[in-house]
């Protein structure tokens, strides 16, 4: 078994892999916004003229969804070059060339010339993108960077898994905690809550937090939580959404 720890470079390579590119590109072209995403975007971003920043835009599923429902001042970035190329191509196909796409790392926006003194009216980090950053301090760095480029009181919408969401999840994570206590966890993982697996989307790193962890990370990085709810409590999604994604917790926060 490979023992080298998962890094940002691991995650970038996995997202640039052909299997992942095809998977996320298909979703960008055919799936669009989930019903739950649509509802909350309109709730927390009521001003269609506000400049929005989408972190981890991937192949453009949410980006083009925003454009389709009327947002016209969108900047979207991702650190996976192959996915970003797909998002640019989809924007051209749908006559949405006014969208600005940037190759950037959420943890290092200060190093990108695209974000020197920019201030956005709101930010999004959808489909658990924040939790695909290995290392808690790195995830906090991303939250701080998004805070830096947003205006005061700007809304921030994102999703995570929740390892306490169901009795089954809680039981599985109790077993995982025993593995960590015995030192028998996957040696590539960095922290309790991490998973690294392979499915139809290719190889995927994901950190599954509990609610208290997310609240602590928001408090440490200048964000005030204003809303959180599991997707199943928000909307009835079409079957294609359930095939594409598991249940998740939606979060909204405000820049303070």
Image (tube, rainbow, N blue to C red):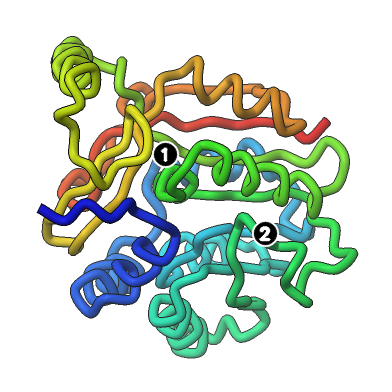
186 left or right, relative to 220: left
- How far is mark 2 from mark 1, CA to CA? 19 Å
Q: What label does residue 189 carry, if any?
A: none
Q: In the figure, is residue 78 to the left or right of 59?
A: right
Image quadrant in which you'd find residue 147: top right
Residue that mark 1 sits on: 36
Give percent across and percent down for residue 143. Answer: 65, 42
Q: In the picture, residue 120 is in which quadrant?
A: bottom right
Q: Is residue 70 above or below residue 138?
A: below
Q: Residue at x 42, y 35 (%)?
A: 160
Within the image, what quadrant is residue 111 found in? bottom right
Using the rendered image of the protein, determine whether residue 231 is visible from the camera's viewpoint: no
Is residue 185 at least partly visible in the picture? yes
Q: Position of residue 196 (x, y in %)?
A: 23, 47
Which residue is label 2 attached to? 53
Q: Please name whichever residue, 105 or 84, is drawn nearer the observer in this view of the structure.
A: 105
The first of marks 2 and 1 along the sequence is 1
- Is 38 on the left or on the right of 53, as rendered? left
Where does residue 14 sit, x and y in percent of width and height? 29, 67
């Amino acid at each position: 078994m490979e023992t080298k720890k998962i890094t940002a470079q691991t995650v970038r390579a996995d997202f640039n892999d052909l299997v992942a590119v095809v998977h996320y590109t298909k979703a960008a072209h055919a799936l669009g916004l989930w019903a739950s995403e649509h509802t909350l975007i309109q709730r927390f971003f009521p001003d269609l003229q506000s400049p929005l920043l989408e972190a981890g835009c991937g192949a453009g599923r949410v980006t083009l969804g925003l454009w389709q429902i009327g947002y016209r001042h969108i900047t979207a970035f991702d650190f996976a070059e192959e996915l970003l190329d797909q998002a640019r191509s989809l924007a051209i196909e749908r006559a949405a060339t006014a969208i600005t796409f940037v190759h950037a790392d959420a943890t290092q926006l200060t190093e990108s010339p695209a974000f020197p003194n920019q201030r956005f009216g709101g930010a999004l980090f959808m489909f658990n993108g924040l939790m695909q950053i290995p290392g808690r301090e790195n995830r906090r760095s991303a939250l701080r960077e998004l805070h830096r480029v947003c205006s005061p009181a700007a809304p921030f919408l994102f999703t995570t898994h929740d390892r306490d969401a169901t009795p089954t999840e809680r039981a599985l994570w109790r077993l995982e905690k025993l593995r960590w206590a015995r030192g028998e966890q996957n040696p590539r993982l960095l922290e309790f809550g991490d998973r690294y697996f392979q499915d139809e989307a290719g190889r995927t790193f994901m950190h599954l937090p509990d609610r208290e962890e997310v609240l602590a990370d928001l408090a440490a990085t200048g964000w005030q939580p204003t809303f959180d709810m599991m997707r199943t409590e928000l909307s009835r999604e079409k079957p294609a959404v359930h095939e594409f994604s598991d249940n998740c917790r939606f979060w909204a926060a405000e820049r303070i």
